[in-house]
């Protein structure tokens, strides 16, 4: 299927996906005892605020991946209700991670509106946002259990060869990705503090790694993109679709992950670039990476080109919250032409990802060639500005 057709299919699936929101929310809020009515009302507000907006790429990608990877001999009229609801579980997990990430990063805006934890702090509810983020994350797998074991009619409509195996694989996947993403988040935080040593020793562009620069290495950035970003943003939704399609081919999940982690690496670099140079009116959030001293693609790349004098400027101003220091860093990035270097990196990354996709060959048993899905993701990702 040409990628142009997949773009059309994406829009069609997204429209249907949105129509399942109310069904998903009713599943989410079902089963509360009367004694928890106040907590139920609060969680309804949490879900409404944090799940009512967004691009839905991860959730829709679950459905698209299922449509791509299902066996071409399967009944085309098989119900997709279950697949859409699992897609919403991925969106729920994503929403929970964002709530927690905003607390950790002291963010103020998310999707053009105040971050959830700030709305709660303004109501004198302290750090209840931490509990709310955890509630969203944990509820994703709760709904999976509910779908399989309390909604037998929905399960029967799908008619898997091995229902229990599908459920087990999904639950294991959500657990594994959540666990690894938390580890990646930990690395992201620790690498932002010069007092935490993520790299034992080494040199970069002839400069000794000192207590300031030792965390801003390509290997640390690579690890963050792998564990914090690539697995849950790209691999999780595609793997969900593959599990729901009951794909069972030796090595295929590992090869899919290899491609998607490459996309995740670029996605994080792009996100770092937009954090610094993006328009907050478009991105819907205010950049915080410079103020927090994050191990971003920009600072890692900058260390390759800085003179000793420029390095001193970076060391004096990077990780400082005041606007003057942040602007000084942006000016420094401009001086060494980082925006231009990002465009070159972008071109090279696209070429490398395209090559790895072309090497992905698994016969013709699927409804759609998986490479078409990967190329669609490349097009989707390389044209985004928010």
Image (cartoon, rainbow, N blue to C red):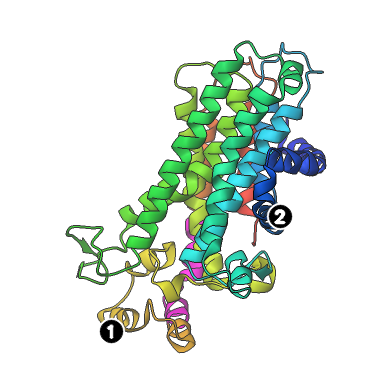
- Point out residue 203 in the picture as x, y percentages from the top left corner: 20, 63
Q: Which residue is mark 2?
A: 41
Q: Is residue 280 above or below residue 247?
A: below
Q: Residue 90: x, y in percent?
A: 61, 41
Residue under the point 51% across and 39% down: 260
As helix, strand or loop, the secondary structure at mark 2 comes to helix
Q: Are marks 1 and 2 in contact (CB under 8 Å)?
A: no
**In front here: 292 or 47?**
47
Q: Based on the picture, tell me whether residue 67 belongs to the magenta stretch.
A: no
Q: Magenta part of the protein: which range?
A: 329-346
Q: Quadrant of the N terminus?
A: top right
Can residue 256 be seen?
Answer: no
Q: Quadrant of residue 233?
A: top right
Query: Residue pushed farthest bottom?
Result: 324
SS of the residue at dot 1?
Answer: helix
Residue 309 has which mark? 1
Q: Residue at x 76, y 20 (%)?
A: 153
The residue at 67%/64% (across/down) is: 111
**x%, y% of residue 55?**
70, 52
The image position of residue 102, as x and y in percent, is 53, 64
Between discs 1 and 2, the one toward the N terminus: 2
The quarter of the displayed image where residue 123 is located: bottom right
């Amino acid at each position: 299927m040409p990628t142009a057709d997949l773009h059309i299919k994406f829009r069609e699936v997204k429209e249907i996906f949105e129509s399942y929101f109310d069904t998903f929310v009713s599943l989410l809020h079902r089963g509360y005892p009367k004694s928890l009515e106040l907590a139920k009302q609060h969680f309804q507000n949490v879900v409404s605020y944090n799940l009512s907006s967004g691009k839905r790429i991860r959730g829709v990608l679950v459905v698209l991946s299922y449509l791509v990877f299902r066996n071409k001999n399967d009944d085309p009229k098989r119900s997709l209700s279950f697949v859409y609801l699992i897609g919403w579980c991925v969106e729920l997990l994503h929403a929970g991670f964002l709530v927690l990430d905003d607390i950790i990063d002291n963010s103020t805006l998310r999707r053009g509106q105040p971050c959830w934890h700030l709305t709660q702090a303004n109501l004198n509810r302290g750090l209840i946002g931490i509990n709310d983020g955890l509630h969203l994350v944990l509820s994703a797998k709760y709904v999976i259990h509910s779908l399989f074991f309390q909604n037998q009619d929905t399960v029967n409509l799908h008619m898997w060869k091995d229902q229990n195996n599908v459920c087990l694989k999904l639950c294991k996947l959500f657990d594994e990705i959540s666990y690894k993403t938390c580890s990646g988040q930990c690395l992201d935080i620790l690498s932002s503090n010069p007092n935490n040593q993520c790299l034992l020793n080494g040199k970069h562009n002839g400069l000794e790694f000192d207590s300031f620069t030792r965390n801003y290495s390509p290997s640390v950035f690579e690890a963050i993109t792998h564990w914090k970003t690539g697995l849950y943003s790209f691999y999780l939704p595609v793997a969900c679709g593959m599990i729901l399609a009951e794909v069972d081919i030796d090595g295929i999940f590992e090869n899919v992950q290899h491609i998607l982690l490459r996309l995740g690496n670029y996605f994080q670099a792009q996100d770092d670039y937009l954090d610094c140079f993006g328009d907050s009116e478009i991105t819907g959030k205010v950049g915080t990476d410079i103020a927090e001293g994050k191990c971003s693609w920009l600072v890692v790349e900058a260390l390759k080109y800085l003179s000793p004098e420029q390095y001193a400027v970076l060391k004096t101003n990077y990780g400082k919250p005041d606007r003057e220091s942040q602007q000084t860093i942006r000016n420094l990035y401009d001086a060494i032409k980082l925006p231009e270097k990002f465009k070159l990196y972008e071109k090279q990354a696209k070429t490398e990802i395209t090559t790895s996709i072309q090497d992905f060959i698994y016969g013709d048993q699927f409804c759609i060639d998986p490479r078409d899905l990967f190329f669609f993701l490349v097009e989707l990702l390389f044209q985004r500005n928010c």
